[in-house]
Amino acid sequence: MAVDVAPEHGSLMGPSARVALVTCAGFPDLWEDDHPLRDALRERGVVVDAVRWDDPAADWSVYDLTVIRSPWDYMNHHERFLSWARSVPRLANPADIVEWNTDKRYLSELAAAGIPIIPTEFVGPDAVGSRAAGPASLGSIAGDSAAVGSGAAGSGALGSGALGSGALGSGALGSGALGSGALGSGALGSGALGSGALGSGALGSGALGSGALGSGALGSGALGSGAAWTPPAAGEWVVKPTVSAGSRDTARYLMPEQSGAAAAHVRRLTGSGRTAMIQPYLSAVDTAGETAVLCTPDADGELTFSHGIRKGPMLTARGDVPVDMNDEQITPRTPSEAELDLAARVLEFVPGGAKRLLYARVDLIPGPDGAPMLIELELTEPSLFLLHAPGAASRLADAILSRI
């Protein structure tokens, strides 16, 4: 059932404004990091309900906007969750974004488009032969240059014409668009992610949508068989499912000592019908940590930099050891100009354009040369770390009101 957290004081907008913040049974009154958003909406006179995504009694049609926040059991019911998302009339972020973003094979699309990602091998349950995403030259960072292969989703996967040189022109989000000045004050420039630069036509639903590199292009037929997967010869590697959240079913292994355990982990995932992904464990996780670049819309609806945080290491032990997300080490961080530039480049490739988004989180890590690399683009249910960024909840609440 919905948990009514309506305002106790006078309404600023009238009685009809109603927003659902989507959660799960584990957090019936929302994850604590979303309390500032709930409270900011209440202060603006909005009726806010915390609603489980799988609540059979929920009537999503009564909400002016439904905002996905902490439905962190969806990975156990992925197809059902996608069906739910498609059924919600006014959902943020939109259902097609949810479908694209909840399976981390989207990283192959971004790699094929030239985004530097952690080299990733995807291993599926049914097919023979494997495909890796990410530059082959980085295979050596974990001691096995062949492990991540040279088939970064195929140099022709997005063909020279699919994202032709003019489709996102070099100036659409040029090196200065997210420079220290453009983002220092909290802006991305009025046109940095404008509807024209990345409008519905520039990267329309077909450009990177379900057709361009959809479930068929990188589906189970393009993936290796879990039973036939061979662990890398050396180095430290991370194994996890492509549909996951909160480091669930994720583990770090040292090769060759833990090769058997790593292979067993991959077989468990693929044996249950899931796709596994294998990535080198980067030493920068333990030193620099991850940088999360958080973006929300500005007054004009353009997705702009809001705040940044540093995440410390989660996989502190080797082997298949459960990870408690309550142990996350989170501190505020000002992203570097290079990190902001890469975040802007990543957001250029959001299907349909970044202006459709209510929020985005771009997780980055320094590569072997110190330049940032993409870990994940979080567009579905990321922690937004509102408790660590004064003013961020108010900015997001204002963005929500602008869409009602």
Image (tube, rainbow, N blue to C red):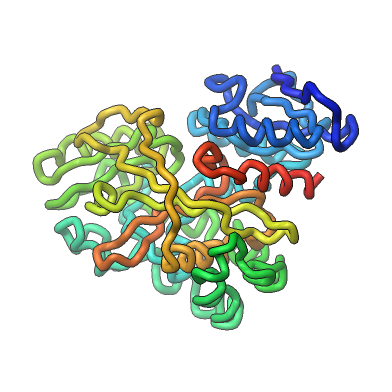
Q: Quadrant of residue 58?
A: top right
Counting from the top left corner in percent of width and height, residue 277 is at: 34, 47
In the image, is residue 227 above or below residue 150? above
Q: Quadrant of residue 170?
A: bottom right
- Residue sitting at x 63%, y 37%: 68
- Of 299 and 240, nearer the camera is 299
Instruction: Evaluate whether residue 393 shows in this view.
Output: yes
Counting from the top left corner in percent of width and height, residue 331 is at: 41, 43
In the image, is residue 73 above or below residue 197? above
**How many marks do you count on the picture?**
0
Counting from the top left corner in percent of width and height, residue 8 is at: 78, 21
- Residue sitting at x 85%, y 27%: 10
- Of 85 and 126, nearer the camera is 85
In the rendered view of the protein, which quadrant contains the C terminus? top right
Instruction: Evaluate whether residue 83 shows in this view.
Output: no
Q: Quadrant of residue 182?
A: bottom right
In the image, is residue 167 above or below residue 356? below
Q: Is residue 331 left or right of residue 268?
A: right
- Of 42 and 360, nearer the camera is 42
In the image, is residue 54 above or below residue 149? above
The outermost residue toward the left is 257
- Residue sitting at x 81%, y 38%: 64
Q: Is residue 256 left or right of residue 5?
A: left
In the rendered view of the protein, which quadrant contains the N terminus? top right
Counting from the top left corner in percent of width and height, residue 49 is at: 72, 26
